[in-house]
């Protein structure tokens, strides 16, 4: 079964010659619908580069990135931008909400850019805000909301419409542990409903929400956790 | 934690017989600490010997309930008021294993670290999945037990990350012969003077 996201032997090198920095060196990764993959690794290991390539925000210097079987490398810039708007949702640490737009306008914006009518976009945006339980904040501006509420709005924006791939880079940011957990809960639910998700994090507790955790070191995937098989063996072992 | 304080805490809720105690114990620890009925009766016998519980007359089904005594209540209060000493916990096999891996020839310590990290991470995923599924209000005690396991696993992963960083910076000291050979010492002195 092919994945929603496929990275095939992806390389990304910045600069040339002796000054070249190899951010990713031959990374292959497939993320299927209904699967959340966490990418862990120390600073500088290539986590954010991987996410930027997966989202078509950067281009690899070698290998291929495919979204639902479509190779991003072959797409003209216009098509790529369209694919990004339609099929990929991004949640970043700095939320990138536009301060001059209300919550519902922020969420509706990518739909409107993509040609959805204003009313239909607003209706879909409200539904997305309801899903993340901040519909009551729809007409507020970002600076009138708490950090947790803003993060939920950012998630609603990432999930609005028919996004098939959600990419999250340290999405809990500076939120307290309860609010951060709520964000991961939402991401998990969305993936359970059929999206594919990639979560970049250096926090093991956050990576725990994933189906699979891959470890990146110096631009190379060094390991991946085995599929989960249930917890009974762990519990019986903890009786001491 | 000892089983005896667990049983005292359960008896503080009301009188119970052996099977009820076992079921209540497992329920309150989310089955992370399975008890066999023999352990329950042995512990009850010791608690009775120490005057911390007292047996009541058998019921019609032939089950003998126990109740906590005032001395048992005092013991339980003291237990809740006393922090658990780290010295009471078992020695950590993992840290000892890594320390030995560093000094044992031919061991790829980074591989040992990575293997453990994947295994611990996987346990953390399992705990998180279980927590995700336990969202009813009455699940709170169980969720807190799970949180404890999650935080412990997280701490282990962080410590393993720290070990890996230290390994990258580590420059092993030259291996010294256990008894210095005069010629070796001379050669080392020559090297140093150059």
Image (tube, rainbow, N blue to C red):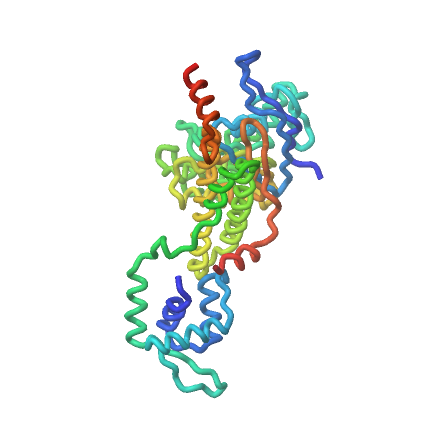
In the rendered view, would you say B22 is above or below A213?
Answer: below
**Residue A43 x, y percent position in the rendering:** 47, 29
In the rendered view, would you say B23 is above or below B58?
Answer: above
Q: Residue furthest right?
A: A1
Q: Residue at x 40, y 28 (%)?
A: A99
Quadrant the C terminus of chain B occupies: top left
Q: Residue furthest front?
A: B182
Q: Depth check: B7 or B131 in front?
A: B7
Quadrant the N terminus of chain B occupies: bottom left
User: For residue A72, which quarter of the picture?
Assistant: top right
**Residue A181 x, y percent position in the rendering:** 45, 45
Q: Depth check: B29 or A97 in front?
A: B29
Q: Is residue A185 left or right of residue A139?
A: right
Q: Residue at x 52, y 28 (%)?
A: A45
Q: Residue furthest top?
A: A17
Q: State whether residue A127 appears in this view.
A: no
**Residue B38 x, y percent position in the rendering:** 50, 73
**Residue B49 x, y percent position in the rendering:** 36, 78
Q: State whether residue B96 appears in this view.
A: yes
In the rendered view, would you say B169 is above or below A2?
Answer: above
Number of marks drawn: 0
In the rendered view, would you say B17 is above or below A38?
Answer: below
Q: Depth check: A46 or A115 in front?
A: A46
Q: Residue at x 45, y 31 (%)?
A: B180
Q: Residue at x 64, y 35 (%)?
A: A30
Q: Depth check: B171 or A183 in front?
A: B171
């Amino acid at each position: 079964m092919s994945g929603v996201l496929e990275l095939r032997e992806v390389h990304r090198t910045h600069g040339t010659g002796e000054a070249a920095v190899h951010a990713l060196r031959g990374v292959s990764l497939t993320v299927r619908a209904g699967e959340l993959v966490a990418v862990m690794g120390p600073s500088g290991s290539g986590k954010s580069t991987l996410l930027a390539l997966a989202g078509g925000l950067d281009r690899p210097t070698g290998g291929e990135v495919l979204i639902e079987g479509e190779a991003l490398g072959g797409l003209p810039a216009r098509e790529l931008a369209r694919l990004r708007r339609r099929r990929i949702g991004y949640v970043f640490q700095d939320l990138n909400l536009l301060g001059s737009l209300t919550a519902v306008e922020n969420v509706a914006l990518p739909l409107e850019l993509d040609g959805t009518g204003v009313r239909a976009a607003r209706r879909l945006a409200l539904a997305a805000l309801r899903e993340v339980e901040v519909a009551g904040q729809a007409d507020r501006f970002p600076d009138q909301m708490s950090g947790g509420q803003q993060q939920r709005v950012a998630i609603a924006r990432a999930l609005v419409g028919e996004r098939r791939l959600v990419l999250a880079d340290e999405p809990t940011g500076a939120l307290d542990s309860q609010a951060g957990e709520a964000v991961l809960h939402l991401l998990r639910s969305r993936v359970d409903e059929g999206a594919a998700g990639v979560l970049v994090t250096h926090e093991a507790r956050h990576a725990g929400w994933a189906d699979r955790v891959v470890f990146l070191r110096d631009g190379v995937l060094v390991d991946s956790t085995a599929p989960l098989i249930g917890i009974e063996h762990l519990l019986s072992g903890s009786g001491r | 934690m000892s089983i005896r304080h667990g049983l005292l805490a359960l008896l503080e809720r009301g009188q119970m017989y052996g099977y009820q105690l076992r079921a209540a114990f497992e329920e309150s620890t989310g089955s992370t600490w399975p008890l066999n009925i023999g352990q329950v009766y042995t512990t009850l016998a010791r608690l009775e010997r120490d005057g911390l519980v007292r047996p009541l007359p058998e019921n019609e089904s032939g089950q003998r309930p126990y109740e906590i005594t005032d001395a048992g209540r005092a013991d339980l209060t003291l237990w809740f008021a006393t922090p658990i000493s780290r010295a009471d916990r078992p020695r950590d096999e993992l840290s000892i294993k890594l320390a030995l891996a560093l000094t044992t020839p031919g061991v790829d310590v980074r591989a040992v670290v990575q293997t453990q990290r994947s295994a611990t991470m996987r346990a953390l995923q399992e705990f998180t999945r279980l927590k995700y599924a336990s969202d009813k209000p009455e699940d709170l005690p169980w969720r807190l037990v799970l949180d404890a396991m999650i935080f412990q696993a997280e701490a282990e992963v962080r410590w393993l990350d720290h070990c890996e960083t230290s390994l990258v910076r580590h420059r092993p000291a030259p291996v010294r012969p256990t008894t210095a050979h005069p010629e070796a010492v001379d050669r080392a002195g020559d090297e140093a003077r150059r």
